[in-house]
Image: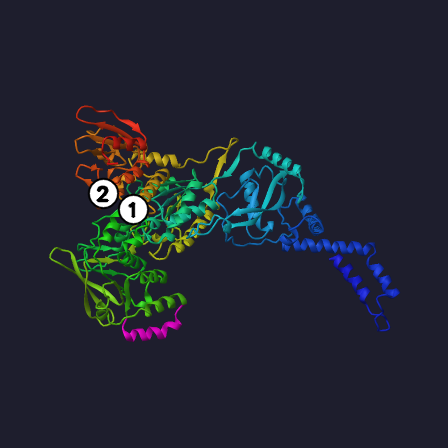
Amino acid sequence: MFPFLFFWRYLFTFFKPSNSGQKTPHYSAVHSAKLSALFNFQSLITVLLLLICTCAYLRAIVPRLIDRNKQGIPGVFWKCARIGERLSLKRRRQMNESGSDRVGVDAGGRLDAVEWQITQRLPHRFWTANNDVYITRKTQLAAQLGRCKKMLDTKCDTNAMSHSVKLDVQTSSVQVTDDVISLFDGDITEARQRTVSAVHVLVFKHLHLLIWTSRSTLQRCLQHTSRTCSTSTHSQRRGPHVAVVGSGPSGLYVCARLLQRLPHCRIDVFDKAQAPYGLIFYGVAPDHVDMKKSMHNFERMFSDNRGRIELFCNVDVSKDIAYGELCANYDAVVLAYGANRARRMDIQNENATNCLSGSAFVSWYNGAQLHGPAPLLDCEDVVIVGNGNVAIDCARLLLSSDERLAGTDITENALRALRQSRVRRVRVLGRRGPQNCSFTIKELRELLGLPGLHAHCVIPTEMTVRLEAELAQMERPRQRLLKLMLDNVNSNHREADNQIDGKRMLQLHFHRRPHVVQLDSGGRVRALSVQNVLDGSVEDFPCGLLIYAIGFEHVHLPGVPTREDGKLDMSDWCRVVTDETKAMVYATGWCSHEARGLIADSQQQAYAVADQLADDWSSSERQIGVVGEAGGDEPDRMPTTKTEQLLHERGVPFISWEDWRYIDQCERRMGAILGKSREKITDPIGLYSMSESAQNSSGTSDKLTVFGGCEGPEACYVKLVSSDGHEFVIHKEHALISKTIRAMLSGPGQYAENETNEVHFREIPSHVLQKVCHYFAYKARYTNSATEIPEFYVAPEVALELLMAANFLDC
């Protein structure tokens, strides 16, 4: 403040008018004397102090403006700013020496605590060193006092160092790459790189608070701190053991956030399915490749955090391991198993043949396990009940050409059925009006844009006029969607049926409620009777395939607290009511609310739940553990190895992350042979890897062999039989079996098989079999009527040569 007063005093003296009321020329002697007075020694000190204060103030507000260049003439401003910061810390130094608990200051010397919300995520390796703290927005250390104190509690015994703990603080810029798990993986790494301020905090004793010290001083302080902190037995905060039930987007987004927020946490992910990723893997349509790219981020999360996160697929939390066991053996349990049962129509004859739910149809073409027969596509008319994205996906897959789906990850069985499909007309029925549709404009635009498709929305003329009048009052997303439907309106669908000219046809009907399913003499669906909600009239829509996609229902785990309406018993928006002596239980995703929303919505909620769990754990007494001189052990909780041993003892053929990586590689290799991204292994036998935990192979064909949970000698080998009776048996060392080989090579005229799992390879092209042989490892046994060679290991190329030598191939 004083430098400003001196400066303005001399400026006022210099520009003050003379007594005569007229300004004296600048070159006059009077002004020359005043100019000399301005630049005397006292004034020079004043100007320097003013420059120092100004630079220090600017560095506190816009540090990049001052720190961009520390050499040459611009470096003078940086040096002035540093001098001002040291002068402003004189009072602070005295407060710390007197025992004040204010142990940190910011680069500008201000003590006001500023709070802000961190909107960008840092890499999962949060601390690159034990003395680094990242600040993501402002470089004010005062706002990080809580985190500095937390670091003190973690790194050393603050009770033994009370009233003598000091901090040595330095700031620098660090280049990091954000580890944001986005919905799409189209962004490049350079786009996620940014510069953050790293605050280096060194804790030491019997030294004053300094802002600038030499490198040698910092090293001596760090060594002194390490010796001081390692000689005492103290309490240390440990990370929680978390069980996540469900490996879909909600569960894995929770894992990603917890790995960032709690660097010492350990996570076990359980899933009933035989593959991770949930709806991304088994629910997203094959032609939506961009939606599946988020799996790459989850793969990177598992690979980069080995030892911190484990995967247990094919584990049913209710049969294989109980919900109560999870609560008793883990610090926290996150329920993210979704809504896994399709809502039924509750009408007459709903269980007719070829009447199935939308989730069953999606599971069929995505390669998931079916709990019923596959759909029959030998009919021309299909009716789909529902106005959501699932209904639109089913209609698009039925009306797409096989060329459009050939390169996707759709299963070969589904692709072959769609190639032979006789479906010509698809009608999508909605129980509500066009202004209440649940599908998105992206889904509808993609469906209407299919080549060779005649599509229109059946809306009466009077309703069309009313909707056009209400269009301007709707929100923009709803307005765009309704406008697209109104641009494809045909009020008379009977007349439109006669104008398709051999093209495939799509009709969207509204205000239709399912009434009765009509059957033919064989018990198969023949038509669907629907009731018009507006006038009550009943109309019959012929169909040989009926799909209903009207939402999902919750099927909660046994033992999970539920209310009378069947929903989870929640104490608030994310916590599940549970015993306080057991684990903290949270819920996210569709299991916590109605089955609605997109993957992006699940991501936002999962992050919020993970943040709540991290905050609850930080304030919980469970995180305190006794650590001795050598680091000690954590409290006796259920580690990953114990979980694995428990599942082994119960005979559960679970699939770990390593097993899934091998299965994933096999699917991609089979897809490369077939000219697609992957060929999913639909056979649950072939999905298991031959690990030591699931292998009990004796190598003989007369004894049952346990192979990944399947009994039978055919699970371990493929028998090649020549026309003259010679046999060549190839045993797999891995998971792929004869059924999988047949799925890889399936196609008209490519193979022949019988009921004994014997495959004749004469008609298989040699270049196809050569690709197959180069992908897997074998051990072989060759027999004929006279001799039998014991089993021996063979390389892929040797196996191919043996096949050719035995005249199995014409090449």
Q: Amino acid at mark 1?
A: Pro
277 or 88, nearer to the observer? 277
Task: Give left or right: position of 536 versus 688.
Answer: left
Is label 2 in contact with label 1 (beta carbons under 8 Å)?
no
765 or 755, nearer to the observer? 765
Q: Quadrant of residue 660?
A: top left
The residue sitting at 43% across, 44% down in the picture is 301
Q: Looking at the figure, which quarter contains the C terminus?
A: top left
The residue that disc 1 covers is: 558
Of mark 2 and mark 1, the one earlier in the sequence is: 1
Task: Give left or right: position of 372 versus 661.
Answer: left
Residue span colored magenta:
459-475
Residue 561 lies, in percent from the top left, at 33, 49
Q: Nearer the viewer, mark 2 or mark 1?
A: 2
The majority secondary structure of the magenta stretch comes to helix
Q: Amino acid at mark 2?
A: Gln
The residue that disc 2 covers is: 750
Residue 171 lies, in percent from the top left, at 61, 46
